Amino acid sequence: MSALATAAHVDVNLAGNRILEDIDLTIRPGQRVGILGANGSGKSTLIKALLGLVPLAKGEVELFGQTPGRQLPWAKLAYVPQTSAVGAGVPTSALEVVRAGLLTGRRPWPPKGSKTRALAALAAVGLEDIARQAVAQLSGGQRHRVLLARALVRDPELLIMDEPLAGVDAASAERLVQALERRGQMTCLVVLHDLGPFERYLRRGIVLSHGRIVADGPLAEVLPTDHHHHHEDPRPRRSRTPELEVRP
Amino acid sequence: MSQYLDYWADMLADPLIQRALLVAILVGGAAPVVGTYLVQRRLALLGDGIGHVALTGVALGWLIGAGLGLAPGALAVPGAVVAAVAGAVIIEVVRTSGRTSGDLALALMFYGGIAGGAALIKVAGGTSATLVSYLFGSLSTLSRGDVATAVALAAIILAVGLTARWALFAVAADEDFAKACGLPTAWWNIVTAALAALTVTVAMRVVGLLLVSALMIVPVAITQLWTRSFGRTMAWAALIGAGTGAAGLVAAYWYDLPPGATIVVLAILVYAAAAISRPVLVRVRSART
């Protein structure tokens, strides 16, 4: 089958700095891919470039065979940003956040039955009880799961997540991955600093360092083993929880 | 007692008061709808900037009207609409370009707007009183035409602000996500800016260009002290805006105060009362659940 996401010779400059350099990648249907690397290696910029959220200095990206733009079948993909201002200004209920996930360019309002679908998506991430609470009052982990529910409610073929474990406690991280596992077949592209429970979910790893891809292959092969790990290694370390790193 | 009733009856029989009440309630209710989006986008002060620019529009309207031999100020509101919408769109474009010089450019535009407006109004034959009426509102001197204009503008604001609420909410709450849903976010940002501009223009008659933001923002500030959802915040803010608009106007009539300023002071007093009583309300609510 054809690729869901491709990047060819992509360079990205932000504020005059080269953030990504000569990126080539292909994501095929059903793949579960982690984009790994140290802070500042360009991981988040890479998925923003794929989504058309940052301008390319060079090269091309395609999602579902289309350049990001009006023609792209946006309904087939869902994006979970690392941070979201949702609920930070005006109080916003979790249910409203998730229902907003059902908008499309052609239908900028939620379809019929959106409330039921949104409640089901919240239940899928274990948050059905807080549907009517303001997201600002939730914990960081719960907020991330609300954002995941907002993406899952779209029933996407391709899920793109940016650091879903940042600021998330171990129990919430585990629940988040379980929600993805229950989902079954779905192509998934996840930016991660630490793998946490994603180590068992992902199959392929792409490792970035200083804006370049330095490794791409089966997850187990691109991860350093604890014995060979040294300080300059840009690749992520295995860890049991997002916060705790395993001692070398 | 009957004395009070007579007083109320006199007041409500006055066509000037009837018009003022209608406009105060309608604008008081419509402004917070737009204000809710602005607060979510952290653009609570956007209305002030647009208001400054609108003054130049008012003055240009006066100038053109004088040139065409129309009644003084006949083109003030159309001029304000054009200048405010143009100003709002420019602000939006400068803001999204993300240049640091943009901040300075906006400051220049705002001060130029208010200074240019003040100077041009005199050129067009206006007086200091004219200027004050635009800066602080002139709710007590509305003509039928003014009311018709206000009703039409408020209807547009409510129609767009409510029917497009999901898109406006999604873009205000999380622009990157909205873009990744395929929403044309640049377009919706401009719609928000244009709505803010129309609100500034219609609120100009009620509280004046210097206080227009208050009408959009203060009811939202009051409501979000206790609400948990965006929809309810907007609905309650509209109700509170309409209520404080009417109550402020009545208080201004009774105590012979400037209506625009009275409405805003009243809304801020309501905010203070709500903020002070909030800890008690929160305790009652958590005791119940």
Image: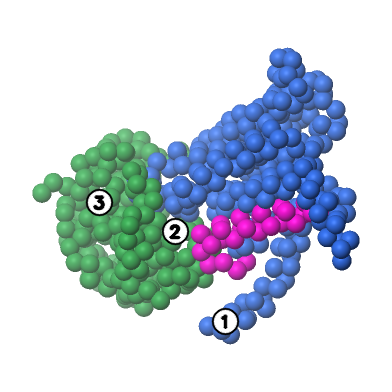
Instruction: Using the image, determine if residue A59 lies above or below residue B232.
Output: above
Q: Residues within 10 Å of mark 2 (few under 14, many from 20)?
A: some
Query: Does the magenta segment cover residue B132?
Result: no
Q: Quadrant of residue B110?
A: top right
**At 31% across and 64% down in the image, what residue appears?**
A117
Q: Is residue B183 above or below residue B68?
A: below
Q: How was this image coloured? A: by chain
**Residue B151 spot, x, y in % from top left:** 62, 40
Tag 2 residue: A83
Q: Nearer the viewer, residue A180 or B123?
A: B123
Three-letter amino acid code at disc 1?
Ser
Q: Amino acid at mark 2?
A: Thr
Q: Which residues are magenta?
A: B225-252
Residue at 60% across / 63% down in the picture? B224
Q: Residue furthest bottom?
A: B287
Q: Are marks 3 and 1 on the same chain?
A: no
Rendering colour (chain B): blue
